[in-house]
Amino acid sequence: MSNSNGTQAIDRAAGLLAEVVHSAGPVTFTELTAACGLAKSTTSRLLLALERNGLVRRDEAGRFLPGDMFVSFAWRGGEASLVTVAQPFLDRLGRATGETVNLGVVTGGEAEVIAQVESTYLIGGTNWVGLPVPLHCSAIGKVLLAYGAPGAVTGDRLERRTGKTITTAAALAADLARVRTRGYAVTDGELEPGLVSLAAPVFRHDGMAVAGLSVSAPAARMTGDRPATAARACVAEASALSAALGHRPKTGTRESPKTRKAGAA
């Protein structure tokens, strides 16, 4: 009898999981109960077990989606869009800070934003999606350089974008060392006058930095404790996104960013 009951529970859980995985979008508890013909108590118990084991997860509205285990597996095979996987983390960071949030990668030796969440303020940031920017004077570019993403800055003299731009290879190397120490990059008026940005690295399952997650705002709003608060939120969401991609930090390394008080790069 116990074996029969155990098999039945597995079959029911598998049925629920199949409904979540094959659904075109997030699915509600009520929809799952109806689709599988189960009692609400049974559905609740099985979904909790699936959630505990990373096979399903919930969005902000409590609807069910494939869990981190599926996301990690799909990412390894290159079948999942990084933007699709990252969007909930960008949205959460945007709500936490109210500022412009960007996800960027290295493309053709430059940093390129591939997803953005707009600021909640009337005066926000530029729409950077699809616009390449130099690696040495953007927060996303710096954090990717610091953590060894493919891409390099060549030559001793670097392009000057503003009066604050780092323009020598030696100064950039020193700044990247500071990025690795604190775990995130900061630019203050280096790409555009009056623009402050902070970025944390996003790692995939093998420890490679594949993207940078950033918060950008006018310098007039980045005063007092706001840079440190934004940095903590950015690091937390970048780490959570890395975990969703299957990354597990090695004990005793500096792969996991720290959240010391943010300052100008």
Image (cartoon, grey):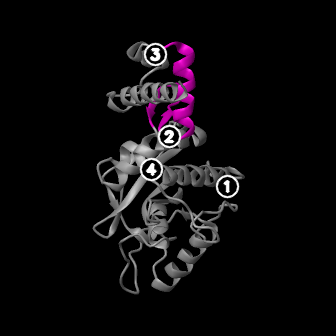
Tell which of 157 and 256 is nearer to you.
256
Q: CA distance from mark 3 to mark 4?
A: 37 Å
Q: Is residue 63 magenta?
A: yes
Spatial distance from mark 4 to mark 2, Cα to Cα? 10 Å
Q: From the image, which quarter does the C terminus lie in?
A: bottom right
Indicate which disc, 1 or 4, sits on the residue closer to the N terminus.
Answer: 4
Q: Residue at x 49, y 75 (%)?
A: 166
Residue at 64% in and 53% down = 232
What kind of residue is marked 4?
Asn
Name the residue carrying label 4: 102
**Residue located beneath label 1 in the image:** 228
- Inter-mark Cα distance, 1 to 4: 18 Å
Q: Are marks 1 and 3 in contact (CB under 8 Å)?
A: no
- Disc on res. 119: 2
Q: Where is 2 relative to 260, above or below?
A: above
Type of the residue with mark 1: Ala
Left/right of residue 234 with respect to residue 105 in the rendered view = right
The magenta stretch is 38-66
Q: Label 3 neighbourhood size at 10 Å, few (<14), some (14-19), many (20+)?
A: some
| Label whose residue precedes the other's in the sequence (4 or 2) | 4
